[in-house]
Amino acid sequence: MTDRATAPGARADMIRNRRQLLAAATEAFAERGVEVSMGEIAQRAGIAKGTVFRHFPSKNHLLAAITLQLVDGLVAAADRLRTADDPVAALRQFMTEGVEVLAADRAFCEVIGRPSLQHAEVRGAINRLCEAVDVLTARAKEQGAVRGDITGTDIVLLLGGIHQTALPLLEQDPQAWRRYLALALDGLCNPAATPLPHPPPAPLSE
């Protein structure tokens, strides 16, 4: 006899509930940041609060799942651009897409560096992101069109830095980040720039 908890219908319900929870939580955290309560997320998803905790034992587990989705999306963007004909344009496009994602999500920059980052899958995704962006960066450096002392990890960190710089302006001007992205890109695309005075950062997930 099939165990009711593992029956196909029960599994389908669990998958559907998880998707609804992640969608509702992603929307809520993006709009209001990480202070949104689990109760409000349950209400948005149309699911009992107890069901939320069966899927995600704590808010940090939920934040880790959402962070993983977002980082995986950035990895996919970097992978898509790695074979572009123009490596410099590809690096610019990746940074534009990356900052645009962050500008639309209040929670992401609040989460990185918090306990959710200790989640093994999140650490792995961040490693994959830095490696994928290293490929984009290396291709641009091979052309001699960007400074030679930058790394993929530098680029990943700059995404958050550009977003944080524009953050006080975003409510009145949601596109303000584009100004600071252009400033950062001008600094990157300057092979003759003065060498950076400090060594490159270690991998973000160490």
Image (cartoon, grey):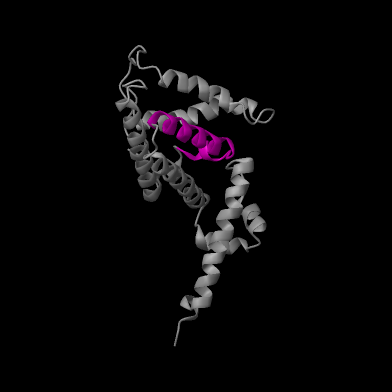
Quick one: which residue is furthest to the right in this view?
172
Q: Is-magenta flag for residue 98? A: yes
Question: Residue sitting at 45 percent across and 48 percent down?
Answer: 68
Examine the image and state in which quarter residue 53 appears.
bottom right
For residue 24, above or below residue 114: below
Q: Is-magenta flag for residue 113? A: no
Q: Please provide percent x and percent y for residue 199.
A: 30, 21
For residue 14, above or below residue 131: below
Q: Please provide percent x and percent y for residue 63.
A: 51, 48
For residue 5, above or below residue 160: below
**The one of 193 and 204 positioned closer to us in this rendering:** 193
Q: Main secondary structure of the magenta part?
A: helix
**Quarter the N terminus occupies:** bottom left
Question: Residue sitting at 49 percent across and 36 percent down?
Answer: 98
Stretch in magenta: 87-112
Describe residue 75's horizontal placement relative to residue 97 as left or right.
left
Examine the image and state in which quarter residue 126 appears.
top left
